[in-house]
Every structure is written in structure tokens, then in C-alpha cells.
């Protein structure tokens, strides 16, 4: 086979709108695209300097062995033809339109005295299908309204004029309870039944205003004729429809027959929401997931989705509301990018829907693939915190003390955005006297990373200091002393406004309160605080208890430690008999303990006060 010469192929392509098709050496169709100018668009694939050429596109281009094309009159025609061909051939390198649900439709059956019900199967028998409905509850709400407004038959009897005239059928329970007017026994004629069907078609198409105006005119006529029974029935229908319209109308009713689209994307997927609006009412909505195959732009993906939705819903709307300009030019369709007003509200509604759908889909995917969530979180943290590498290993420092006494420092470690509790550490502060949080932080950071350097342990990519500029400066002083200040990123977090401080930056950085990055930092900070406070409490309580026993003449540190180890608390030492005490200490020490607690008896209130102090932070 001759080697494919793309230059020769491009020379044959005219600068007109159309659809191009790429084929591989085996004669398989591998890609379909549309273009306003076929020659320019196809040429761009073979331009090595083109910014669109990424790794996937290069693979596609390397497989092209033949190019065919189809010229059409307008770009809109190319757009529709591209969608039709993609759905038919499903080329390997085109985006994958994912829609594994079969959505329900409301069908008006093609028969005498038509039935109205919902179905998931479309049969080409002349029946009218309205939908599809992405929301099952919305569909049932509409059907319930129709049933309440217009009693229709639910049976599948062949109600031909001959069968009815022959008296072959009898009314059923539905007639007895008022859900049917009995056309099977000619209690309702075909003209009256068809009138109800026409009103129902208007309601299902979103034209509730037309039906309301008609009902209002009939109601006024019934009142003028003093037909109060008929007026009561019409008034009830009128109120039900107005109530339904008030719930479903979201914008000015002058906005009629428009399509609304919005898009949300990530690296691998795109999600496009579609709203169909009739007379200010959203009558159809659906969101489509698109799996990217190449480096498609949002404009490309939205164009594909618009074509798919309009084909699927048989939409002929002459106005399409979109979030940004599209390179589509057709006199039959007006593309609107609203900035204010009711149309902007519709676009915002579509954006909320697509954002929710995207979040829901990604959550489902991440639950099945936890490693994907981890990579996304780390990538987001790297971007938000301006890091030069993924923060797979993060450490957070926190200090605790009680009026300068029992100072401790705690370190918690997160690996791949999750707590690694086996790596948690705490320090008894050795070089600091009194409540000096800055000096305590300096000692903890120095001791931590000096040891890691001595042991050859890999340093973390990110260090978080619980505190403001002072604590951060103290931490950086230790890192500079160790000569590793440039090997890791250090930030401080201040509790009051959740401000993030960087060394040398005059002003703090603020992250969105809902940011996942901020939530992970807060989780680190809170975990360090919890771990540090727990250690600090234990140390302080132990120190308080031991001091109480060491006040006893003749009882030193060893004896007090042995007593606490055996009796578990000072209260139980106080309550122990001399015989029990002699099992732990000698006779002289046992008598000293008994004598001390006899002389220093405390009231219940004083004892309670002791325990409250022990629990105080």
C-alpha cells in the first residue's frame, strides 16, 4: 500500500462547510469531525506547531491512511450530519456519549378515545410521545394532574362505534368513582373526549396559559347561564392548573420555545445539561455525560451535545441559550449568551443542574476508585497552595501548655491526604521555661527534622504550623539552622479567620471556605490539636497526682510511682488500709501515708475541685 500523503489529500479538500472522516490502514472509520472550513480544519491536524496537537491527537494523526469529506450548505447542516454519523458509526477517537438509561415518555395512544399513560418503549404506530422525562416524579406529577383535570379511560377495550352501539361493554369501577365518564357505554361522546385530549396536549407541551384562558372563558359562560354545577367543576380545574403553573413557571412566560444548554468539564469528562422551556415553563430536562477521547475544547463538546439533544428531543426551537459564543452561523437559529435578566436565570439554573450532576457522578466514580479521589485532592492542593510537587506527605505541628507548665508539642502526619497514625509523634519540651509558644515551636521543628536527617528519612513535601507569623518564623529559623528551608514548603494557619501565611509574604492567603484544600488543612490542624491536648492532659494529670503523694514526708518519687501504679489513683491510695499499703511500701512509709491523709482530710467540695482542675485545659 502506498504511503499516505496528507498534503495531496488536503489539496483536494475545498474551503467549504462540511464533515470530514478519517480512516485507518484497515479501512476502519476512526474519527468524524465537522468544520466551517474543511481545508483549514483538516490542515490543522497536520500542523506540528498547532497548540491543539496533544499526545492523543498525534496518535490519531499517525493512524490516518485516508480522508473523505462531505460538503453541506451551512455549518448547522455539518453539525447535524456529524452527530448523525457519530451515532451510527461510533468511531474510536470520537467522544463517547454516555446515556445508559431508558427515560420514560408520556404517550397519547393512537386510537379512538385515546388512553394516556407512561412508557419506556416507543412504538411507531402513530401515537404521540411526549418527553423523555429525566425526572420520574415530575412525570407522575403531570399524569396525576391530567387525571384529576380530565377523567379518561384506562381500559384497553376496542371502543369502535359498532362495539359501543352493540352494547358489548359495561362501565367499570373507574366510572363509579368518577375517574372515567364511561365512553364504553356512550355516556361520553367522542367530541367531548377529544376536546379534553387537545387540552392535555397543550398542558404536556407547556402551554398551560392557553388552557387556563380557555377554562376562564368557559367558567364565565357557565356562571352567566347560572349553570353552577358546571361552574364549580370548571373553577376547580382552573385552580388546579393555576397552582400547577405557579410551581412550574420559573421565568417570564414571554420566553417561549427556547433550548438552554450549559457545560461542566474536567480532564476526562464533560457534562452537558439541557432545558426545554415553553411559555416560561421548563418542560424537559436531561444531563448527558461525554467521555473525552482527544483534546476537545468546551466549544466542541457543547456543539456535539446540542446536536445530540435537539435530535433526541426533536427540538425545532429557533433560539438556543448557551454560556459562551459558539462558532455556528445559521440564519434559522439564534444563539444567545445572556448576561442579565430572565434568560440569565435560565442559564444559571442549567449551570446548577450540570454542576450537581458532575459532582454526583464524580463522587460515585471516586467511591469505586479511591485512588482517583486521592490524586484529584492532591492535585487540587498543589494548585491551591502553589506547590511544585504533590503533597503526598504532610506534617502539622501544634503546641500545648497550662500556664507555662507541662509544655508539649505534637506532630500529626497525613500520607496521600489520609491520617498516618503510626507516624504521629509528641515531644516533651526540654529547653523552654514558661509560656513561650514561639520557642517551643522552634525546638519541636528542630528536633523533628534533625532526627529525620540523621535517620535518612524522606522529608515531607508540606509542613503546616498551627499559628500565625510568629510561630511560622520560629519554624523557619529551625529549618534554616538545619539547612533544609528550601527543601519543603511551610505554611502557617491562624485560627481566627483561617488565614494561611507563607514565609516572607506580608499578606495572608485566603481559600474558599468550602475548598477541599482548606478542609484537609483544617483536619490536619484539628487532629494535631487533639493529639497534643490528649498527651498534655495525661502529662499534667500525672504530674498533679504525683505531686500530691510526694508532699507526704518519707514518700519519694519511687514510692509514689509504685503506689499509683498499684492503686491507679490518689483517691484509692487515700482509702487503702495500712495492711494494703504495706504490700507496696515499707511499714514506716505506710504509716506516713495514713497519718498524712488523716491530718489533711478534704471535704467533698474540695475533692471535686481537685478533679475539675485536672480536667481543665
Image (tube, rainbow, N blue to C red):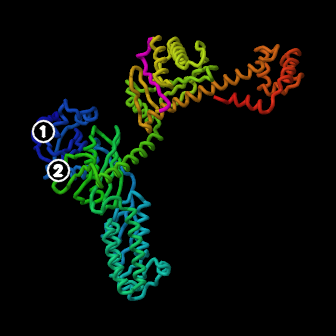
The disc placed on residue 451 is none
The residue depicted at 32 percent of the width and 41 percent of the height is 292
Q: Which residue is drawn at 80% across and 25% down?
A: 567
Q: Is residue 87 in view?
A: no
Which stretch appears magenta?
A: 483-496
Image-quadrant location for residue 209: bottom left
Q: Mark number for residue 329?
A: 2
Q: Earlier in the sequence, mark 1 or mark 2?
A: 1
Residue 411 percent coordinates (x, y): 55, 23
Left or right: residue 424 versus residue 263 is right
Give the left or right position of residue 607, taking residue 139 as reference: right
- In the rendered view, does 191 fall on the left or right side of 538? left
Where's residue 515, x and y in %?
43, 37
Q: Is residue 75 left or right of residue 441?
A: left
Q: Does the magenta stretch include residue 97?
A: no
Q: Quadrant of the C terminus?
A: top right
**Mark 1 sits on what residue?**
10
Measure how far apart labels 1 and 2 are at the Cα level: 24 Å
Q: Which of 173 and 8 is in front in this view?
A: 173
User: Quarter of the image holding residue 186?
Assistant: bottom left
Instruction: Give 465 or 161, whichever is nearer the viewer.
Output: 465
Amino acid at each position: 500500500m502506498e504511503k499516505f500523503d496528507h498534503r495531496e489529500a488536503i489539496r483536494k479538500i475545498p474551503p467549504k462547510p462540511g464533515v470530514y472522516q478519517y480512516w485507518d490502514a484497515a479501512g476502519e472509520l476512526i474519527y468524524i469531525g465537522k468544520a466551517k472550513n474543511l481545508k483549514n480544519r483538516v490542515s490543522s491536524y497536520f500542523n506540528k506547531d498547532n497548540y491543539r496537537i496533544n499526545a492523543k491527537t498525534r496518535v490519531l494523526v499517525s493512524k490516518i491512511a485516508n480522508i473523505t469529506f462531505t460538503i453541506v450548505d451551512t455549518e448547522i447542516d455539518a453539525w447535524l450530519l456529524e452527530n448523525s454519523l457519530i451515532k451510527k458509526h461510533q468511531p474510536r477517537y470520537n467522544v463517547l456519549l454516555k446515556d445508559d438509561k431508558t427515560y420514560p415518555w408520556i404517550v397519547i395512544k393512537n386510537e379512538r378515545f385515546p388512553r394516556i399513560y407512561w412508557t419506556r418503549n416507543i412504538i411507531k404506530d402513530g401515537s404521540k410521545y411526549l418527553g423523555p422525562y429525566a425526572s420520574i416524579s415530575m412525570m407522575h406529577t403531570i399524569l396525576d394532574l391530567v387525571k384529576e383535570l380530565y377523567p379518561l379511560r384506562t381500559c384497553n377495550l376496542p371502543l369502535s362505534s359498532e362495539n359501543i352501539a352493540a352494547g358489548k361493554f359495561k362501565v367499570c369501577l373507574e366510572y363509579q368513582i368518577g375517574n372515567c365518564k364511561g365512553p364504553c357505554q356512550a355516556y361520553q361522546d367522542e367530541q367531548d373526549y377529544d376536546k379534553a385530549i387537545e387540552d392535555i396536549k397543550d398542558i404536556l407541551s407547556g402551554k398551560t396559559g392557553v388552557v387556563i384562558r380557555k377554562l376562564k372563558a368557559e367558567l364565565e359562560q357557565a356562571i352567566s347561564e347560572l349553570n353552577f354545577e358546571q361552574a364549580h367543576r370548571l373553577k376547580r380545574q382552573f385552580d388546579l392548573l393555576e397552582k400547577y403553573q405557579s410551581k412550574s413557571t420559573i421565568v417570564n412566560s414571554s420566553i417561549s420555545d427556547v433550548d438552554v444548554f450549559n457545560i461542566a468539564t474536567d480532564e476526562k469528562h464533560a457534562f452537558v445539561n439541557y432545558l426545554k422551556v415553553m411559555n416560561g415553563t421548563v418542560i424537559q430536562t436531561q444531563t448527558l455525560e461525554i467521555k473525552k477521547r482527544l483534546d476537545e475544547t468546551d466549544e466542541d463538546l457543547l456543539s456535539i451535545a446540542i446536536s445530540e439533544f435537539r435530535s433526541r428531543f426533536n427540538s425545532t426551537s429557533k433560539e438556543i441559550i448557551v454560556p459562551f459564543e459558539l462558532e455556528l452561523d445559521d440564519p434559522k437559529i439564534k444563539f444567545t449568551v445572556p448576561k442579565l435578566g430572565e434568560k440569565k436565570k435560565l442559564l444559571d439554573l442549567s449551570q446548577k443542574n450540570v454542576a450537581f450532576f458532575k459532582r454526583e457522578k464524580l463522587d460515585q466514580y471516586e467511591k469505586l476508585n479511591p485512588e482517583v479521589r486521592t490524586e484529584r485532592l492532591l492535585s487540587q492542593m498543589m494548585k491551591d497552595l502553589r506547590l511544585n510537587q504533590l503533597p503526598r506527605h504532610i506534617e502539622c505541628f501544634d503546641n500545648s501548655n497550662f500556664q507555662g507548665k507541662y509544655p508539649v508539642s505534637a506532630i500529626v502526619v497525613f500520607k496521600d491526604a489520609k491520617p498516618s497514625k503510626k507516624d504521629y509523634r509528641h515531644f516533651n519540651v526540654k529547653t523552654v521555661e514558661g509560656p513561650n509558644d514561639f520557642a517551643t515551636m522552634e525546638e519541636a521543628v528542630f528536633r523533628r527534622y534533625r532526627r529525620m536527617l540523621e535517620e535518612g528519612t524522606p522529608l515531607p513535601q508540606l509542613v503546616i504550623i498551627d499559628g500565625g507569623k510568629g510561630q511560622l518564623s520560629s519554624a523557619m529559623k529551625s529549618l534554616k539552622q538545619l539547612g533544609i528551608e528550601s527543601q519543603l514548603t511551610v505554611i502557617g494557619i491562624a485560627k481566627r479567620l483561617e488565614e494561611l501565611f507563607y514565609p516572607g509574604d506580608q499578606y495572608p492567603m485566603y481559600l474558599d471556605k468550602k475548598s477541599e484544600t482548606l478542609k484537609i488543612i483544617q483536619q490536619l490542624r484539628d487532629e494535631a490539636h487533639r493529639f497534643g491536648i490528649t498527651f498534655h492532659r495525661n502529662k499534667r494529670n500525672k504530674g498533679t497526682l504525683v505531686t500530691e503523694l510526694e508532699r507526704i514526708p518519707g514518700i519519694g518519687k519511687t514510692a509514689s510511682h509504685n503506689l499509683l501504679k498499684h492503686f491507679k489513683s490518689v483517691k484509692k491510695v487515700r482509702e487503702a488500709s495500712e495492711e494494703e499499703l504495706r504490700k507496696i511500701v515499707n511499714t514506716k512509709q505506710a504509716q506516713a501515708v495514713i497519718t498524712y491523709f488523716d491530718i489533711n482530710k478534704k471535704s467533698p467540695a474540695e475533692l471535686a475541685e481537685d478533679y475539675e482542675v485536672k480536667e481543665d485545659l
